[in-house]
Image (cartoon, grey):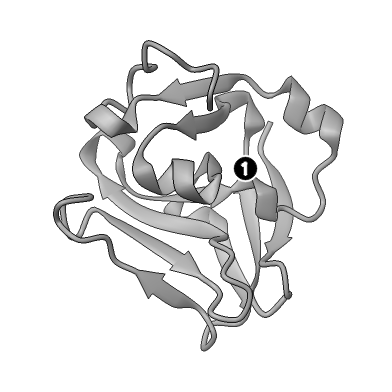
């Protein structure tokens, strides 16, 4: 069921509201970005996220082409606390524009809701977001 959640970075300089449906799962990926940042995500439609505070504060990390094809994904972060609350992507298989929301940044979720969500592993290291890597225990 789709519900509105509120989130922020650690220092609260950036805040947002987003409609998410955890029935779609929480995704853990083994790509270098997700592994190194501890990013676990849930996908949202492009019109489902509203930045409520910190538009001028928000910074964008654009991966080099060796890490991700340019233009496909934009990772946003707070320059004060370093937290990455969400990323914006454009992929045909996702229906165009979408948000990948870092679930660690949601302020009003509860442990039971997160624990009940299906866990989906992505083999982003091999650019296979549609398949789990052979080993997932380290994710």
Q: Is residue 12 left or right of residue 99?
A: right
Residue 61, placed above or below residue 117: below
Q: Which residue lies furthest to the top in this view?
A: 134
Residue 128 pos. (x, y %): 27, 25
Residue 30, placed above or below residue 58: above
Q: Depth check: give the residue in front, 31 or 59.
A: 31
Label 1: which residue?
Answer: 20
Q: Which residue is pictured at 37% across the width and 17% down the height?
A: 133
Residue 83, placed above or below residue 113: below
Neighbour tally class for label 1: few under 14, some 14-19, many 20 plus, Cα within 10 Å: many
Q: Which residue is pictured at 66% across the width and 67% down the height?
A: 9
Q: Is residue 23 left or right of residue 3?
A: left
Q: In this view, does 26 lie to the left or right of 113?
A: left
Per the image, label 1 sits on a secondary structure element best described as strand
Which part of the image, by quadrant, shows the N terminus? top right
Residue 25, placed above or below residue 45: above
User: Image quarter for residue 125?
Assistant: top left
Q: Which residue lies furthest to the bottom in this view?
A: 56
Residue 131 pos. (x, y %): 34, 17
Q: Which residue is pictured at 50% across the width and 69% down the height?
A: 77
Residue 33 pos. (x, y %): 39, 48
Residue 16 pos. (x, y %): 64, 66
Q: Depth check: give the residue in front, 114 or 65.
A: 65
Q: Depth check: give the residue in front, 101 or 68.
A: 68
Q: Which residue is pictured at 15% across the width and 52% down the height?
A: 66
């Amino acid at each position: 069921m789709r519900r509105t959640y509120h989130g922020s970075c650690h220092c609260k300089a950036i805040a947002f509201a987003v409609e998410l449906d955890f029935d779609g799962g929480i995704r853990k990926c083994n790509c270098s970005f997700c592994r190194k940042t501890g990013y676990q995500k849930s996908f949202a439609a492009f019109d489902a996220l509203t930045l409520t505070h910190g538009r001028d504060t928000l910074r964008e990390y654009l991966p080099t082409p060796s890490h991700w094809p340019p233009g496909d994904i934009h990772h946003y972060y707070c320059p004060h606390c370093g937290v990455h609350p969400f990323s914006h992507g454009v992929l045909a298989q996702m229906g165009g524009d979408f948000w990948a929301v870092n679930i660690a940044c949601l302020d009003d979720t509860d442990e039971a809701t997160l624990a009940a969500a299906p866990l989906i592993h992505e083999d982003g290291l091999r650019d296979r977001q549609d398949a789990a890597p052979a080993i997932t225990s380290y994710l």
